[in-house]
Amino acid sequence: MMSKRIAIVGGGYIGAELAKSLEETGDVILIEPRSHFVHAPAMIRAVVEPALLDQALIPYDGLLKRGKIIQACAESIDSTGVTLEGGEKISADYVVVATGSSNATPFKPTEKGIEGLRADNARIHAMLRAANNVVIVGAGAVGTELAGEIAHFMPEKKLTLISDQPSLFPDMPPKLGRGLEAKLRAAGVTLVLGARAENLENFVTPYAGTLKLSNGAEIGADLIFPAIGSRAASKLLENLPGVVKSSSNRIKTDEWMRPSRSLPNVFAAGDVADAGDAMTIVAASRQLPWLKKTLMSLVAGKKLEEQKPYKPWAEGKAPILIPLGPSKGSSFLVLFIAGNLLTRMMKGKDLFISKYRKLFGQS
Protein backbone atom coordinates (compact mmCIF):
# COMPACT_ATOMS: atom_id res chain seq x y z
CA MET A 1 0.00 0.00 0.00
CA MET A 2 1.34 3.43 -0.96
CA SER A 3 1.88 5.85 1.90
CA LYS A 4 -0.55 8.73 2.20
CA ARG A 5 0.95 12.20 1.91
CA ILE A 6 0.15 14.89 4.49
CA ALA A 7 1.08 18.47 3.62
CA ILE A 8 1.23 20.88 6.55
CA VAL A 9 1.38 24.58 5.73
CA GLY A 10 2.96 26.58 8.54
CA GLY A 11 5.68 25.52 10.95
CA GLY A 12 4.39 27.19 14.10
CA TYR A 13 3.35 25.49 17.32
CA ILE A 14 0.67 23.27 15.80
CA GLY A 15 2.29 22.68 12.41
CA ALA A 16 5.78 21.79 13.59
CA GLU A 17 4.73 19.42 16.35
CA LEU A 18 2.06 17.80 14.18
CA ALA A 19 4.60 17.17 11.42
CA LYS A 20 7.00 15.54 13.85
CA SER A 21 4.28 13.38 15.40
CA LEU A 22 3.07 12.09 12.02
CA GLU A 23 6.31 11.45 10.15
CA GLU A 24 6.22 7.75 11.11
CA THR A 25 2.60 7.49 9.90
CA GLY A 26 2.70 8.94 6.42
CA ASP A 27 4.70 10.94 3.92
CA VAL A 28 4.88 14.29 5.73
CA ILE A 29 5.82 17.54 4.03
CA LEU A 30 6.05 20.72 6.10
CA ILE A 31 5.86 23.95 4.09
CA GLU A 32 7.31 26.93 5.94
CA PRO A 33 8.82 30.10 4.44
CA ARG A 34 11.22 30.87 7.29
CA SER A 35 14.50 29.21 8.22
CA HIS A 36 13.83 29.40 11.97
CA PHE A 37 10.96 28.69 14.32
CA VAL A 38 10.10 31.83 16.30
CA HIS A 39 9.28 30.99 19.91
CA ALA A 40 6.76 33.76 20.61
CA PRO A 41 6.70 33.84 24.46
CA ALA A 42 10.46 34.37 24.53
CA MET A 43 10.19 37.23 22.03
CA ILE A 44 8.40 39.31 24.66
CA ARG A 45 11.27 38.95 27.11
CA ALA A 46 13.79 39.42 24.31
CA VAL A 47 12.62 43.04 23.97
CA VAL A 48 14.34 43.74 27.29
CA GLU A 49 16.90 40.89 27.14
CA PRO A 50 17.94 40.61 23.46
CA ALA A 51 20.59 37.98 24.23
CA LEU A 52 17.63 35.58 24.48
CA LEU A 53 17.12 35.74 20.70
CA ASP A 54 19.70 33.07 20.00
CA GLN A 55 17.66 30.64 22.11
CA ALA A 56 14.24 31.79 20.88
CA LEU A 57 15.01 31.51 17.14
CA ILE A 58 15.38 27.79 16.48
CA PRO A 59 16.48 26.32 13.11
CA TYR A 60 14.03 23.97 11.40
CA ASP A 61 16.71 21.66 10.04
CA GLY A 62 16.69 19.37 13.09
CA LEU A 63 12.91 18.94 13.35
CA LEU A 64 12.17 16.00 11.05
CA LYS A 65 14.04 12.77 10.38
CA ARG A 66 11.80 11.12 7.77
CA GLY A 67 9.57 13.98 6.75
CA LYS A 68 10.56 16.80 4.41
CA ILE A 69 10.65 20.55 5.03
CA ILE A 70 10.19 22.88 2.08
CA GLN A 71 11.22 26.48 2.75
CA ALA A 72 8.70 28.29 0.58
CA CYS A 73 5.48 30.29 0.66
CA ALA A 74 2.22 28.55 -0.22
CA GLU A 75 0.23 30.36 -2.90
CA SER A 76 -2.98 28.31 -2.88
CA ILE A 77 -4.54 25.01 -1.82
CA ASP A 78 -7.13 22.70 -3.29
CA SER A 79 -8.31 19.12 -2.82
CA THR A 80 -5.18 17.75 -4.50
CA GLY A 81 -2.53 19.61 -2.55
CA VAL A 82 -0.63 22.88 -2.22
CA THR A 83 0.69 25.20 -4.93
CA LEU A 84 3.80 27.14 -3.97
CA GLU A 85 4.79 30.63 -5.06
CA GLY A 86 6.48 30.09 -8.39
CA GLY A 87 3.97 27.44 -9.45
CA GLU A 88 5.38 24.19 -8.03
CA LYS A 89 2.59 21.83 -6.96
CA ILE A 90 2.95 19.65 -3.86
CA SER A 91 0.43 16.84 -4.21
CA ALA A 92 -1.15 15.64 -0.99
CA ASP A 93 -3.93 13.38 0.23
CA TYR A 94 -4.54 15.63 3.26
CA VAL A 95 -3.69 19.28 3.86
CA VAL A 96 -3.46 21.04 7.23
CA VAL A 97 -3.25 24.84 7.16
CA ALA A 98 -1.66 26.21 10.34
CA THR A 99 -0.38 29.59 9.17
CA GLY A 100 -0.66 31.27 12.57
CA SER A 101 -1.07 34.98 13.12
CA SER A 102 0.71 38.31 13.03
CA ASN A 103 1.37 40.64 15.93
CA ALA A 104 3.10 43.94 16.54
CA THR A 105 6.83 44.27 15.95
CA PRO A 106 9.05 42.78 17.32
CA PHE A 107 6.96 39.98 18.85
CA LYS A 108 6.52 38.10 15.58
CA PRO A 109 8.41 38.29 12.27
CA THR A 110 7.18 40.33 9.33
CA GLU A 111 7.79 39.85 5.62
CA LYS A 112 11.41 40.86 6.33
CA GLY A 113 12.03 37.40 7.81
CA ILE A 114 14.37 36.30 10.57
CA GLU A 115 17.15 38.82 9.93
CA GLY A 116 14.55 41.57 9.81
CA LEU A 117 13.22 40.35 13.14
CA ARG A 118 16.70 40.54 14.65
CA ALA A 119 17.11 44.08 13.33
CA ASP A 120 13.70 45.11 14.67
CA ASN A 121 14.53 43.65 18.07
CA ALA A 122 17.82 45.54 18.25
CA ARG A 123 16.21 48.81 17.15
CA ILE A 124 13.31 48.62 19.61
CA HIS A 125 15.51 47.46 22.48
CA ALA A 126 17.65 50.56 21.92
CA MET A 127 14.52 52.72 21.93
CA LEU A 128 13.40 51.08 25.17
CA ARG A 129 16.76 51.64 26.87
CA ALA A 130 16.67 55.31 25.94
CA ALA A 131 13.06 55.83 27.05
CA ASN A 132 12.11 57.09 30.49
CA ASN A 133 8.33 57.00 30.09
CA VAL A 134 6.93 53.83 28.48
CA VAL A 135 3.28 53.12 27.66
CA ILE A 136 1.80 49.78 26.57
CA VAL A 137 -1.58 49.90 24.83
CA GLY A 138 -3.44 46.61 25.18
CA ALA A 139 -3.52 44.36 28.23
CA GLY A 140 -3.96 40.92 26.75
CA ALA A 141 -1.31 38.26 27.27
CA VAL A 142 1.38 40.08 25.23
CA GLY A 143 0.82 43.52 26.78
CA THR A 144 0.57 42.24 30.34
CA GLU A 145 3.64 40.02 30.03
CA LEU A 146 5.62 42.84 28.43
CA ALA A 147 4.71 45.12 31.33
CA GLY A 148 5.94 42.47 33.76
CA GLU A 149 9.21 41.97 31.88
CA ILE A 150 10.01 45.69 31.70
CA ALA A 151 9.08 46.18 35.36
CA HIS A 152 11.40 43.32 36.36
CA PHE A 153 14.44 44.05 34.20
CA MET A 154 14.12 47.85 33.96
CA PRO A 155 12.43 48.96 37.19
CA GLU A 156 13.66 52.52 36.71
CA LYS A 157 11.23 53.07 33.82
CA LYS A 158 7.97 54.92 34.36
CA LEU A 159 5.58 52.32 32.95
CA THR A 160 1.87 52.55 32.13
CA LEU A 161 -0.40 49.72 30.92
CA ILE A 162 -3.65 50.78 29.23
CA SER A 163 -6.70 48.59 28.63
CA ASP A 164 -10.15 49.46 27.34
CA GLN A 165 -11.52 46.70 29.59
CA PRO A 166 -12.53 47.39 33.21
CA SER A 167 -10.18 44.69 34.51
CA LEU A 168 -7.38 42.44 33.33
CA PHE A 169 -8.55 39.25 31.60
CA PRO A 170 -12.27 39.89 32.22
CA ASP A 171 -13.28 36.64 30.49
CA MET A 172 -11.35 34.58 33.02
CA PRO A 173 -12.12 34.02 36.73
CA PRO A 174 -11.88 37.43 38.47
CA LYS A 175 -9.18 36.23 40.86
CA LEU A 176 -6.70 35.95 37.97
CA GLY A 177 -7.08 39.58 36.91
CA ARG A 178 -7.10 40.89 40.46
CA GLY A 179 -3.89 39.06 41.29
CA LEU A 180 -2.10 40.32 38.19
CA GLU A 181 -3.28 43.89 38.80
CA ALA A 182 -1.96 43.80 42.37
CA LYS A 183 1.42 42.41 41.32
CA LEU A 184 1.86 44.94 38.53
CA ARG A 185 0.99 47.85 40.81
CA ALA A 186 3.38 46.53 43.45
CA ALA A 187 6.09 46.52 40.78
CA GLY A 188 5.44 50.19 40.05
CA VAL A 189 3.28 49.83 36.94
CA THR A 190 0.46 52.36 36.51
CA LEU A 191 -2.74 50.68 35.27
CA VAL A 192 -5.31 52.64 33.27
CA LEU A 193 -8.37 50.42 32.91
CA GLY A 194 -11.61 51.05 31.06
CA ALA A 195 -10.09 53.71 28.79
CA ARG A 196 -9.48 53.44 25.05
CA ALA A 197 -6.55 55.02 23.19
CA GLU A 198 -8.28 57.17 20.59
CA ASN A 199 -5.33 58.36 18.50
CA LEU A 200 -3.00 55.38 18.26
CA GLU A 201 -0.76 56.36 15.34
CA ASN A 202 0.74 52.96 14.66
CA PHE A 203 -0.79 49.54 15.30
CA VAL A 204 2.25 47.44 14.41
CA THR A 205 5.42 49.09 15.67
CA PRO A 206 6.44 51.12 18.75
CA TYR A 207 6.80 54.90 18.47
CA ALA A 208 7.07 58.07 20.60
CA GLY A 209 4.09 60.37 21.00
CA THR A 210 1.11 61.52 23.03
CA LEU A 211 -1.97 59.35 23.58
CA LYS A 212 -5.45 60.77 23.99
CA LEU A 213 -7.70 58.47 26.00
CA SER A 214 -11.46 58.10 25.96
CA ASN A 215 -11.58 59.24 29.59
CA GLY A 216 -10.18 62.63 28.57
CA ALA A 217 -6.63 62.05 29.79
CA GLU A 218 -3.51 62.62 27.71
CA ILE A 219 -0.30 60.65 28.24
CA GLY A 220 3.00 61.61 26.66
CA ALA A 221 5.51 58.81 26.22
CA ASP A 222 9.04 58.32 24.97
CA LEU A 223 7.92 54.92 23.71
CA ILE A 224 4.43 53.54 23.03
CA PHE A 225 4.06 49.81 22.47
CA PRO A 226 0.90 48.79 20.55
CA ALA A 227 -0.15 45.38 21.87
CA ILE A 228 -3.75 45.24 20.75
CA GLY A 229 -4.00 41.62 19.69
CA SER A 230 -3.07 39.15 16.99
CA ARG A 231 -4.65 38.82 13.56
CA ALA A 232 -4.79 35.47 11.84
CA ALA A 233 -2.79 34.90 8.66
CA SER A 234 -5.80 33.53 6.77
CA LYS A 235 -5.09 34.62 3.19
CA LEU A 236 -4.56 31.03 2.05
CA LEU A 237 -8.05 30.01 3.22
CA GLU A 238 -10.27 33.03 2.73
CA ASN A 239 -11.11 32.38 -0.94
CA LEU A 240 -12.04 28.72 -0.54
CA PRO A 241 -15.69 27.84 -1.30
CA GLY A 242 -18.08 28.54 1.58
CA VAL A 243 -15.47 29.97 3.92
CA VAL A 244 -16.74 32.17 6.77
CA LYS A 245 -14.37 34.71 8.33
CA SER A 246 -14.87 35.65 11.98
CA SER A 247 -13.11 38.16 14.23
CA SER A 248 -9.36 38.82 13.95
CA ASN A 249 -9.31 37.36 10.41
CA ARG A 250 -9.90 33.85 11.72
CA ILE A 251 -11.71 31.23 9.64
CA LYS A 252 -14.66 29.29 11.02
CA THR A 253 -14.24 25.51 10.97
CA ASP A 254 -16.76 22.70 11.21
CA GLU A 255 -16.83 20.00 13.87
CA TRP A 256 -13.89 18.23 12.17
CA MET A 257 -11.82 21.40 11.87
CA ARG A 258 -12.44 21.84 8.16
CA PRO A 259 -12.75 25.39 6.80
CA SER A 260 -14.64 24.38 3.66
CA ARG A 261 -17.17 21.61 3.17
CA SER A 262 -16.18 21.55 -0.48
CA LEU A 263 -12.67 20.38 0.48
CA PRO A 264 -13.23 17.49 2.92
CA ASN A 265 -9.51 16.62 3.09
CA VAL A 266 -8.38 20.14 4.09
CA PHE A 267 -8.08 21.08 7.78
CA ALA A 268 -7.24 24.31 9.59
CA ALA A 269 -5.60 24.59 13.00
CA GLY A 270 -4.11 27.02 15.48
CA ASP A 271 -4.67 30.78 15.38
CA VAL A 272 -6.05 30.75 11.83
CA ALA A 273 -8.87 28.35 12.78
CA ASP A 274 -11.87 29.63 14.70
CA ALA A 275 -12.71 26.25 16.19
CA GLY A 276 -13.88 27.69 19.51
CA ASP A 277 -10.46 28.10 21.12
CA ALA A 278 -8.74 31.36 22.00
CA MET A 279 -5.61 32.51 20.15
CA THR A 280 -3.09 31.27 22.70
CA ILE A 281 -0.62 28.40 22.59
CA VAL A 282 -2.22 26.63 25.55
CA ALA A 283 -5.79 27.14 24.32
CA ALA A 284 -4.96 25.53 20.97
CA SER A 285 -2.96 22.71 22.56
CA ARG A 286 -5.82 20.20 22.56
CA GLN A 287 -6.10 20.55 18.78
CA LEU A 288 -2.77 18.78 18.34
CA PRO A 289 -3.68 15.35 19.79
CA TRP A 290 -7.05 15.45 18.02
CA LEU A 291 -5.45 16.17 14.65
CA LYS A 292 -2.81 13.52 15.17
CA LYS A 293 -5.34 10.84 16.09
CA THR A 294 -7.75 11.83 13.32
CA LEU A 295 -5.13 11.96 10.56
CA MET A 296 -3.65 8.64 11.66
CA SER A 297 -7.13 7.12 11.42
CA LEU A 298 -7.65 8.58 7.96
CA VAL A 299 -4.30 7.26 6.76
CA ALA A 300 -5.36 3.83 8.08
CA GLY A 301 -8.44 3.95 5.85
CA LYS A 302 -11.13 5.04 8.31
CA LYS A 303 -13.75 7.63 7.43
CA LEU A 304 -13.68 11.07 8.98
CA GLU A 305 -17.34 10.85 10.05
CA GLU A 306 -16.43 7.81 12.15
CA GLN A 307 -14.06 9.92 14.26
CA LYS A 308 -15.11 11.94 17.27
CA PRO A 309 -15.59 15.62 16.37
CA TYR A 310 -13.17 18.13 17.81
CA LYS A 311 -14.28 19.58 21.15
CA PRO A 312 -12.77 22.96 22.05
CA TRP A 313 -12.26 24.31 25.52
CA ALA A 314 -15.41 25.68 27.08
CA GLU A 315 -15.45 29.47 27.09
CA GLY A 316 -13.22 30.83 29.84
CA LYS A 317 -11.98 27.36 30.80
CA ALA A 318 -8.75 27.08 28.81
CA PRO A 319 -5.62 27.38 30.95
CA ILE A 320 -3.56 30.55 30.64
CA LEU A 321 -0.13 31.31 32.10
CA ILE A 322 0.90 34.95 32.57
CA PRO A 323 4.43 35.43 33.90
CA LEU A 324 5.47 38.92 35.00
CA GLY A 325 9.17 38.43 34.45
CA PRO A 326 11.07 35.31 35.50
CA SER A 327 9.91 35.14 39.11
CA LYS A 328 6.32 36.40 39.39
CA GLY A 329 2.95 36.00 37.71
CA SER A 330 -0.42 34.29 37.92
CA SER A 331 -2.01 31.45 35.97
CA PHE A 332 -5.42 29.89 35.53
CA LEU A 333 -5.06 26.11 35.59
CA VAL A 334 -8.72 25.10 35.12
CA LEU A 335 -9.35 24.10 38.73
CA PHE A 336 -7.50 26.91 40.53
CA ILE A 337 -5.49 30.12 40.20
CA ALA A 338 -1.75 29.55 40.57
CA GLY A 339 0.55 32.23 41.96
CA ASN A 340 4.20 33.16 41.63
CA LEU A 341 5.80 29.78 42.34
CA LEU A 342 3.84 27.61 39.92
CA THR A 343 3.78 30.28 37.21
CA ARG A 344 7.54 30.64 37.54
CA MET A 345 8.18 26.89 37.41
CA MET A 346 5.76 26.23 34.54
CA LYS A 347 6.62 29.18 32.30
CA GLY A 348 8.28 32.24 33.78
CA LYS A 349 11.69 30.74 34.50
CA ASP A 350 12.30 29.13 31.10
CA LEU A 351 9.39 30.28 28.86
CA PHE A 352 9.24 26.72 27.44
CA ILE A 353 12.50 27.36 25.57
CA SER A 354 14.01 24.01 26.61
CA LYS A 355 10.90 22.13 25.45
CA TYR A 356 10.93 23.61 21.98
CA ARG A 357 14.68 23.41 21.48
CA LYS A 358 14.42 19.72 22.31
CA LEU A 359 11.49 19.30 19.88
CA PHE A 360 13.60 20.84 17.13
CA GLY A 361 16.64 18.70 17.89
CA GLN A 362 18.70 21.51 19.43
CA SER A 363 20.68 21.43 22.64
Image (cartoon, rainbow, N blue to C red):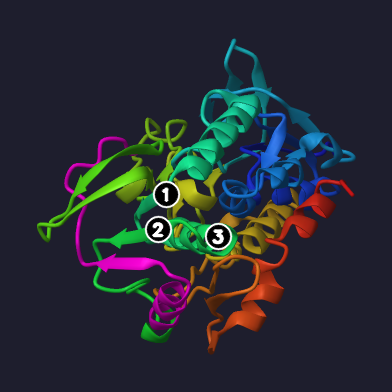
**Nearer to the camera, 295 or 211:** 211
Mark before the other along the chain sequence, 2 or 1: 1
Tag 2 near tag 1, CB within 8 Å: yes
Left or right of 27 on screen, residue 104: left
User: Nearest the camera: 236 or 159?
Assistant: 159
The x and y percentages for residue 42 are: 64, 52
Task: State the separation of the CA atoms marked 2 and 1.
Answer: 6 Å
Comparing labels 3 and 1, the label whose residue is closer to the camera: 1
Return the mark for residue 158. Answer: 2
Indicate whether 306 appears above or below 243.
below
Which quadrant of the view contains residue 190? bottom left
281 to the left or right of 229: right
Query: Would you name the residue on which mark 1 appears?
Result: 132
Q: CA distance from mark 2 to mark 3?
A: 13 Å
What's under tag 2, amino acid-wise? Lys
Task: Kindly state the secondary structure of the residue where label 2 is placed.
Answer: strand
User: Furthest residue to the top?
Assistant: 86
**Which label is found at residue 149?**
3
Q: What is the magenta range?
A: 177-203
Q: Amino acid at mark 3?
A: Glu
Q: Count residues near mark 2 (Cα–Cα under 10 Å), then give few for <14, some for 14-19, many for 20+.
A: some
Say which residue appears at 49% left-offset and 50% top-offset: 271
Q: Is residue 209 left or right of residue 26?
A: left
For marks 3 and 1, give the CA distance.
15 Å
Decide if residue 235 is in sight here.
yes
